Image: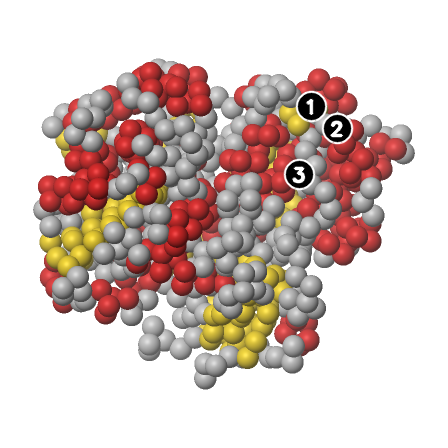
Amino acid sequence: MADDKPRYKSYNSPAGGWGAAAATAKVLLEQSVVTKGSRALLSMNQPGGFKCPSCAFPDAHCTRKLEFCENGAKALAHEATKFRVTREFFAQHSVSELMEQSDYWLEMQGRLTEPMRYDAATDHYVPVSWDDAFALIGRHLRALASPHEAEFYTSGRTANETAFLYSIFVREFGTNNFPDCSNMCHEPTSRGLPHSIGVGKGTVILEDFDHAEAIFLIGHNAGTNAPRMMTPLVEARKRGIPIVAVNPMPERALIKFTEPQDIVQMATFGSSAVTSEFVHIRIGGDLALLKGMMKVLFEREAAGDTVLDHDFIAEHTSGFAALKADIEAQHWPDLVAASGIEEAQIRRCAEIYIASNATIICYGMGVTQHQQGSQLVQQIANLLLLKGNYGKPGAGISPIRGHSNVQGDRTVGIDEKPGQAYLDRVRDVFGFEPPREEGHHTVESVEAMLAGTAKVFIGLGGNFVRAVPDTDRAYAAMRGLNLTVGIATKLNRGHLVHGRDALILPVVARSERIETAAGEQFVTIEDSMSNVTASRGVLEPASADLLSETEIVCRMAMATLPDSKVDWASYIDDYGLIRDKIAAVYPALYEGFSERIKAPMGFHLDIPPRRRAWATPNGKANFLILPGLAVNAGVDDPDMLRLATVRSHDQFNTTIYSYNDRYRGVYNDRMILFMNADDIAARGLEPGTKVALETFSVDGVVRRVDGLTIIDYPMSRGSVAGYYPELNPLLPLAFYDKTSGCPAAKSIPVRVVASSVG
């Protein structure tokens, strides 16, 4: 990057198309895996192949020859890379030296090749045998005064079989401390939706997009975060289906998109308009939009029109009168002020919804990452309930989750708040009494570290310390631990911000074959629409000294629990035995798992709302109220802006593929502040100026990030955006949704101040 001057240039070409094809070729070349990577891409998301390690969008149930996107290709290329992080690398670089490097530089060093242990005397990682590594983990865990002094993190890339065994190991050890990546993204879905519709996941399957009469996209950027979603959206627009996008910043892929698999478009450099209506919402204004749309429905009813599904409401729901009273009490000037958009546009959105007999509402972290994200999700559910948009083709609620098995991990037991019926089944199937009290979510786990009541952290994938809020405090928390364990494919910041003892345990990647004494094994993945499919790697492992995540979990359990009631050794070799146990613990979802998974496209888990069945205490879908129009704590200061942290197009979660974000016109820079032209002028600033951001204090601590370059970008007024994780230091640990524990990363109250950086 040192030789590449930052550039900022508007991107006016369509998203996808030849730009995506060129980016795919470039990353394969950059990682020196053109032949190997190209061959592997042909197996990605195909029956008999492996599931993309990137997003969780489902595979098309058709015979397309290619079922991957640009970002999936990047994820594969970085897994399949020829570059290696060896013992010689660690001998050359101390941990202190590595801490000075960027996240991008760390990522580009390549694949980890053997287990390593931190040596405090030299400040280097040194080789350690697998047996000694597991023995060290076992000693630390057994030495704890309480099992609750350990935190067990799970990344969404963890397969069902591994996540299930991890949950059993940790519960036999004696705790429900399961901070996981869902806590930081879609936990409001998991905690908010069950009160509304009885299930903490979406009700839509991919085929519903073929039958929808309207699609709403709220608070997510499909072109970057779930690019394969663009295909059903484009197909819907070709059928004339209205698509409404709601976002504080316009995203290129939702304006014009070229389908890489459309031969005619590619040959003619054509493109498709995707959205029929763009709603330039203010950050936090979604609640006002939703209430405004519902207000139009009630106004139409009062005028004598029948726009609600009265039969559905009477038979299937509860709480209608209270919702109606709340909505009718809203005043249009307040709705307009809170949303940042005109009344006429709110009414247009409502009329699109009214005209549709089957509507899908998709949403992302622009909805969930607020202080009342769980309740905001419930308002989306309310809107859909009013017209009976559950249990019929082309309709339902669709959270667009990020990581490729984050939903599956929750389904098979990664849950800090497990239900008692589930714990009873664990007891009956495995023969031990699991802990009954709730464990820690992500924020609580960092709080426990800071308080000194957490002593050990084990990270099954991911880059925990870089993903969590309040970076400086998170670093201090991790460094106070007795042991940190990073189970990973690549070197990341989490291995450098470590406890007094630390281990790096390298694993077989999703795209690589798993061979055991019983032969080749496969794992399973649940996508964001509850379809479970097999994933079988096709590449040789990057090193002969890698272990599968499943074996690592089993051997940690064997080293920690010498008197365990579980036959851990058997699960190392035969993953079919694990699936049999999953079916035993979850008979309603996974009965006949081993047979059903043989279907080329897998099978869908039962989602009761698709049958108009509601697993709520009253057996009904519930209209739930969120009073007022604000979803975030107010800051009484006219200088306050709301900051949303976002990903670039060359990024997946904390993994940085380059310093570019071509759809937003940013090259060779990540220290960026996207800002509305009027907000820039109102502060006497100019585009290109370097500034700092400070968080309006919620706890007396001043949080500041300096050296941000202002980019004139069509943000909504009062809203700014910048890249994650660089701006995580601005997000206070205490600033989160109290229902779910999800950090409010899409609405941080900040002020722009003078920079001290030249």
What residue lies at 34% left-to-right and 72% top-to-bottom? 1
Confirm whether residue 337 shows in the render.
yes
Dot 1 and dot 2 residues touching (CB under 8 Å): yes
Q: Give the Cα distance between marks 2 and 3.
A: 13 Å
User: What residue type is disc 1 on?
Assistant: Thr
Between residue 747 and residue 296, name the one nearer to us. 747
Identify the residue position indicated by label 2 in the image. 320
Mark 1: give few (<14), some (14-19) or many (20+) Cα within 10 Å: many
Residue 633 badge: none
Q: In this view, which residue lies farthest toward the bottom?
A: 758
Identify the residue position indicated by label 3 in the image. 379
**SS at mark 2 in the image:** helix
Query: In this rendering, would 650 be left or right of 147?
Result: right
What residue lies at 57% left-to-right and 60% top-to-bottom? 698
What residue lies at 10% left-to-right and 41% top-to-bottom? 131
Q: Give the Cα distance between marks 1 and 3.
A: 14 Å
Residue 347 percent location from the top left of the image: 78, 45
